[in-house]
Amino acid sequence: MIPHATQSPLPLEGSGEASTICALATAPGGALGIIRISGPQALSICGSICRGITPETSPNTVHFTRITNGTEVIDECMVSVFKAPHSYTGEDSVEISCHGSRYVLNRVLSLLVEHGCRMANPGEYTQRAYLNGKMDLSQAEAVADLIASTNRATHRLAISQLRGGISTELSHLREQLLKLTSLLELELDFSDHEDLEFADRTELQSLAQTIDLHITRLANSFEAGQAMKQGIPVAIIGKTNVGKSTLLNRLLHEERAIVSDIHGTTRDTIEDTIDLQGVTFRFIDTAGIRQTTDQVELIGISRTYAAIEKARIVLWVIDAEPTLEELNDIKERCGGKSLIIIQNKIDKQSDVISLPEETNNSPVLPHYSKMGKDTCYHILPISAKSGQGIEALEQSIFQAVHLPTITDSDIIITNARHYDALQRAHAHLTRIIDGLHTHLSSDLLAEDLRLTLDTLAEITGGQITTNEILGNIFKNFCVGK
């Protein structure tokens, strides 16, 4: 068994010489396994088991060598050498690339521990990179997001954050606030001169409002960021035997749900994901909605309604004209969500169904619509069995969520900690703007400006100093990163 990480406190700045750590950076069982070593003794400890590696070995070099335990050869490997500060952690570092045998990896890690390493904690390499100034905290968190990225959208968001997109944006805002904070502080130093003002109140109010707009825009992007990060929930609902399970299978391109002519076959929710235009969507097939006395089926129907509550998009599958009562029920349950009404089985019935509220002179509408009091609906005809209309449906699903187009320069908040800090910064700025309207004194304005600066600094790590907070941030990282 590969040695586990210890639970010793993570090293912090100013806590003395850091220990030398090691960990497996790749999943065991593959063709190759990479073991990372970082810390002041990285080269000497590596040299104790790898022939030809010494503290004098040139940096940024790769060496073919053998791992030995005395006279016993454990493996032949490649060793990459990096020296502080030009490494991922900012410390002396070594990466041993050996064969992926669990036995070999276990022996190498055990030898490293015997010669003075300790097993790294989750995220400790990235934490050391942060503490050594190789990246700020938002960039460090982006490393975890990059590892966890599952589609093009989440990958682009993580890369943008890793390259300092959030840091640059916040740095610009903080510089503007810091200038005015300094002027207000200067006024306080000359408090004996009551009429003396260094900070123009009109300029301060305009700047506070501009910065608040930027912060609000960033905070408002959190919903879209979370949707892209976690997957957008889409509920497939309708009566029994309208083809909901067939539609799910068609969208997933696999036989995920049981399809049968027997009513009430699906009695629980079935969930799976697909990637549409680089964004993950979570499709939830639900039990058919109908009048029944079957207790198990009734539980399934109640879960259907729960799935509607959690979904951002609802696909209502019909194969016959619904009643006004049914339409009103769906409208009430889907209030505020995007609704796509799907007429299935057009391979059997080519005529497009009309809805009770739809009029002949209604304008051409998109295939989806935000639910609203005076909304007309356009039905999207498909055949889940043959695949006809599925491409148009997928396009409608993607458009229905109204996600922003992501480029390398886009800044979208995906981290709940960042969102919380932005919300608090917005609250401080709101007090500043209100205080300027009511001619609040300079000392109180300066205090709120300081709080705003400190809150924004939390995102990049300017105010994070305790081991407990850092441990909480890095605890979900994988070992070896």
Image: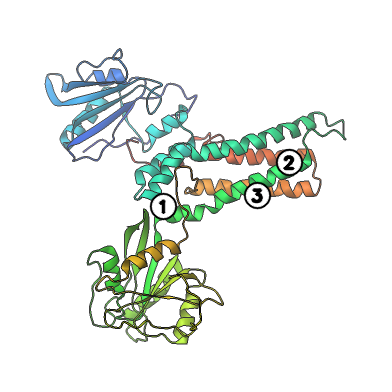
Residue that appears at 24% across and 27% down? 96
| Residue count near mark 1 (Cα–Cα under 10 Å), binned few <14, some 14–19, many ≥20 | many
Q: Position of residue 340 (x, y in %)?
A: 42, 71
Q: Is residue 93 left or right of residue 330?
A: left
Residue that appears at 83% across and 32% down? 191
Q: Which mark is residue 204?
A: 2
SS of the residue at dot 3?
helix
Residue that appears at 59% across and 40% down? 456
Closer to the camera: disc 3 or disc 1?
A: 1
Q: Distance from label 3 to label 2 (Cα)?
A: 16 Å
Q: Position of residue 426 (x, y in %)?
A: 63, 48
**Residue at the spot of label 1:** 229
Which residue is at the far left? 72
Q: Which mark is residue 427?
A: 3
| Residue count near mark 3 (Cα–Cα under 10 Å), binned few <14, some 14–19, many ≥20 | some
Q: Earlier in the sequence, mark 3 or mark 2?
A: 2
Closer to the camera: disc 3 or disc 2?
A: 2
Which image quadrant for residue 100? top left
On the question of residue 471 being in view, the answer is: no
What amino acid is labelled 1 in the image?
Answer: Lys
